[in-house]
Image (cartoon, grey):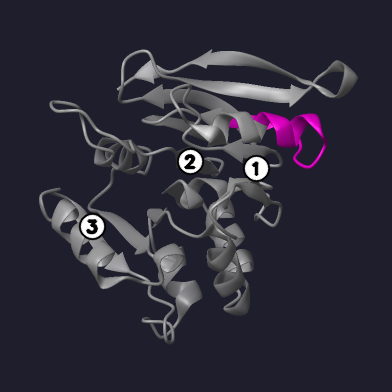
Amino acid sequence: MTPVRKQIFAFSGVLCPEPGQQSSFALVDHALSLAPRDGARRVCYVPTAVGDAQAQIDGNAAAFASRAGVELSVLRLFTQPSVPDVRAHLLAQDVILVEGGSVVNLMAVWRAHGLPEILRECWDAGVVLAGASAGSLCWHLGGPTDSFGDSLDAFTDGLGFVPCSNGVHDDFADQPRRRVYRRLIADGTLPAGYASEDGVGLHYIGTALHEAVSIRAGKRAWRVWPGADGGYAEEPIDARLI
């Protein structure tokens, strides 16, 4: 019997796309490619982090409409679950795609509906868990977030399927998340972890980082850990261009 491959694909979408660049949906396509190829891929889109906003649902439905061989469903949790059996529905998927937004509100609603236990069961069963921004942070122990207010604060209540922290939108150019992520690791608020620049995805197999991929040339991921004398240390991780 072939062992189950437990996979997470956590990525940073492109906040400021330039003309001619691939859109962030190319990273979603990569997540789909990680799922088994026998028949249509079943994808459940989970927009909890944006309060199940209809505009986000419609936008993703339109994007998926051009993808052949994909069966898309949406799990809404406001004002009640949109499927009669959440566990059965999610276990029947090939990919679960989590929208960005408020990771704090996402986790609160998920816990109220028992999603953490269900999602772990999905992961153990080989369902690919994926998402951008808040949909990236949620699989880790935590990371910087603006969910509490305009400033960046520490979120430390993630699912922890990947037992490390996560930084998203970790770019050099005018991006305070990069600086705050390293400060929170240096002072011990967050454990060591991995950060992704815009357009970069982190592919975990089990709890280990398998590779970083990017839709933008020259973009990288970073491993960051506490350093000496209250500082931090870091090393770049080259991302395979897709």
**Residue, x 14% and y 28% (percent of image)?**
19
Residue 92, quarter of picture: bottom left
C-alpha separation, residue under disc 1 versus residue under disc 2: 10 Å
Region of the chain picked out in magenta, as a range: 182-194
Query: Are there few (<14), some (14-19), or many (20+) residues within 10 Å of tag 1?
Result: many
Q: Nearer the viewer, residue 1 or 96?
A: 96
Q: Amino acid at mark 3?
A: Asn
Task: Identify residue type, mark 2.
Answer: Ala
Q: Which residue is mark 1?
A: 162
Residue lying at the far left in this picture: please name it: 66
Name the quadrant of the C terminus: top left
Name the one closer to the observer, 168 or 42. 168
Image quarter for residue 239? Answer: top left
Tag of residue 60: 3
Side of 8 where 56 appears, left or right? left
Do the residues under discs 1 and 2 have CB atoms within 8 angstroms?
yes
Does label 1 or label 2 sit earlier along the sequence?
2
Q: Nearer the viewer, residue 119 or 145?
A: 145
Which residue was labeled with disc 2?
A: 10
Q: For residue 150: magenta?
A: no
Q: Residue at x 57, y 22 (%)?
A: 222
Q: Position of residue 122 (x, y in %)?
A: 53, 59
Residue at 34% across, 61% down = 45
Mark 2 and mark 3 lie on one chain; the one further toward the N terminus is: 2
Q: Secondary structure at mark 3?
A: helix
First-in-chain label (3 vs 1): 3
| Residue 46 in the image, given as x and y percentages of width and height | 39, 64
Q: In the displayed structure, would residue 127 be above or below residue 46?
A: above
In the structure shown, which secondary structural element does the residue marked by tag 1 occupy? loop
Image side of residue 24 versus residue 58, left or right = right
